[in-house]
Image (spheres, rainbow, N blue to C red):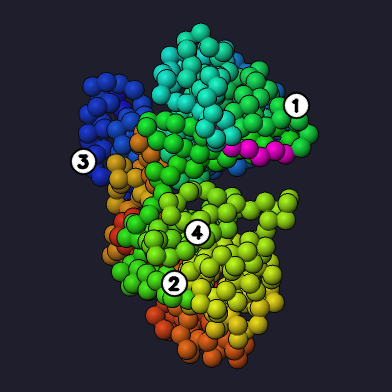
Amino acid sequence: MTSLMDRKMAELLVRDSVLTQADLDLAFTKQNETGGSLGRILIDNGYASEYDLANALGKHLNVPFMTLSHYEIDPEILRSIPTEIVRKYRIIPVDKAGDTLTVALADPSNIYLLDELRLLTQCKIVPVISFESDIQEAINTYYGQPESELEDMLKEIADMDTRDLEVIKGGEEIEQPDNELTVEPDAAPVIQLVNMIVQDAIKMRASDIHIEPYEKELRLRYRIDGVCHEMKSPPKSFQNAIISRIKIMSELDIAERRLPQDGRFKVTYGGKNIDFRVSTCPTVHGEKVVIRILDSSNLLLNLTDLGMTPEQLEKFEQNIRAPWGMVLVTGPTGSGKSTTLYTALSTINDPNKNIMTCEDPVEYQLRGINQVAMKPEIGLTFASALRSFLRQDPDIIMVGEIRDGETAEIGVKAALTGHLVLSTLHTNDAPSSINRLTNMGVEAFLVTASVNMVVAQRLVRRICSECKISYAPPHELLHSLNMPPETQFCRGQGCDRCLGRGYKGRCALYEIMVLTDNMRDRILEGISSSGLKRLAIEEGMMTLRGAGLNKILQGVTTIDEVLSVTAPDDR
């Protein structure tokens, strides 16, 4: 039997083009056959996402929506409602002002629950809508997991098969039997737990593992496609044992808890070697651990896989095959600069050429290339390594990052003396890299004589192919982007394959600026970054925003993703 509330919500979903009438009729049929709430049927069958339902319900009831993960709840407010009531009804108090208590819940139309809360707390109850999954995460965060969940986790650990997972301490080949992550059923639970964390992260193609201690919980998160996802929390009582186990694997000092430490280990899993970089940092409630996963099988070493347009690819390949000069790749941390440079090096790798790199650290090892890891503590810096390289008869040099004027000056001089130099910079776009170099103290005439090409890039998430649907965004948004209203747009509804996020994998946006004679003349005249950008656009440069709009039109990513990482072209 369909309630009046369900029908009202369904009408809003159809009106907003979230659902088709045909999908709604199928959902009503399934509800009549199996019972249950219409909202759960819509989510489970992929007709609508949690966001769509919350948005529709909020409009109908005139109740605001709240993302709990963006909000810190006062412990005093949490005590307003007994824990057993919070768990039973999946609600959570979020704010209190006088005798008014704000409560987050998935279904604010449940007037009986609101009345019960009013009688229980002797407060006026103000409901806000939140995702059911967010509410459950908040309950686990603030109230801890019930004993049954911990028992389930330990049972899951005991049932796991990690026999094909083997660790090598410090990343070096050694044979001691305690270096294996292979675990027998009667092995210590903490070893099995660490194995499960590592193995799950590999399976989910995570780039980082975050283990974060708080007062009453130990939080576990995986960074997948650039976004942190909260996982089932390990027991707080395992905190010190988990951190000590990771330190032993990484050959760190388990007795040192006051200072940050860095280490590494290597895992053999599924027939491939995977490197892990470990960083510990002392916090108020213990040591936070971040583990970077460096899976070389995920490294793109083919230019055509980078995602450039044919015109961009032609410019890029032409300049990385130049006999001399400088190629710069710019962007913030985590924007894929290293992947682009490694792919370029792999493309131009030739036994007839001497290729040398200085990196901090060496993330992936490439056959036939001489790679040097920086060690500032003993004086091995980018600048000192570059000086040494110039006495090693190099043809191609890669500098992990130009951080200071000394490194920039040596790199420019190397580019002017017959070497091809590839490096990275931290700038917002390609044109501003020129000013960045001059601000470091490199003369403008040296910059124009040495720099051949600057590539700016960003990463955006791909729409999940399993739950991809078409939709129509607001006309005002299309107008602001100068896009025709009849354009078809796509987004992901959220499914098990993409963890309910609607995205799976990432792709890069590229802005490639090849310096022309006209640009060089204007740079020597002192043109500003914004002026250089306008000139580059006039000469055919596609901006990051333009590259993003292309990916939207191709159905690869969404408007929200592009707007979050690119700036308007008129800035």
> Mark 3 or mark 1: which is in front?
1
On the image, numbered disc 1 is attached to which residue? 255
CA gap, disc 3 and disc 1: 64 Å
* Sooner in the amino-acid sequence: mark 3 or mark 4: 3
On the image, numbered disc 4 is attached to which residue? 337
* Sooner in the amino-acid sequence: mark 4 or mark 1: 1
* Residue displayed at 72% across by 39% down: 260
Where residue 295 sits, quadrant-wise, is: top left
Q: Is residue 105 visible?
A: no
Give how far across and how far down residue 396 sits, in percent: 49, 67
* Sooner in the amino-acid sequence: mark 4 or mark 2: 4
Q: Which residues are magenta?
A: 260-265
Q: Is 448 situated above or below 407?
A: below
CA gap, disc 3 and disc 2: 46 Å
* Residue displayed at 57% across by 86% down: 523
* The one of 134 and 211 positioned closer to us in this rendering: 211
Q: Is residue 131 left or right of residue 347?
A: right
On the image, numbered disc 3 is attached to which residue? 22
* Residue displayed at 51% across by 67% down: 394
* The one of 407 and 488 positioned closer to us in this rendering: 407
Indicate the secondary structure of the residue bearing disc 1: loop
Give how far across and how far down residue 456 sits, in percent: 49, 67
Question: Overall secondary structure of the magenta stretch?
Answer: strand
* Residue displayed at 39% across by 80% down: 540
Identify the amino acid type marked 4: Lys
Identify the amino acid type marked 2: Ile
On the image, numbered disc 2 is attached to which residue? 512
Indicate the secondary structure of the residue bearing disc 4: helix
CA gap, disc 2 and disc 1: 49 Å
Indicate the secondary structure of the residue bearing disc 3: helix
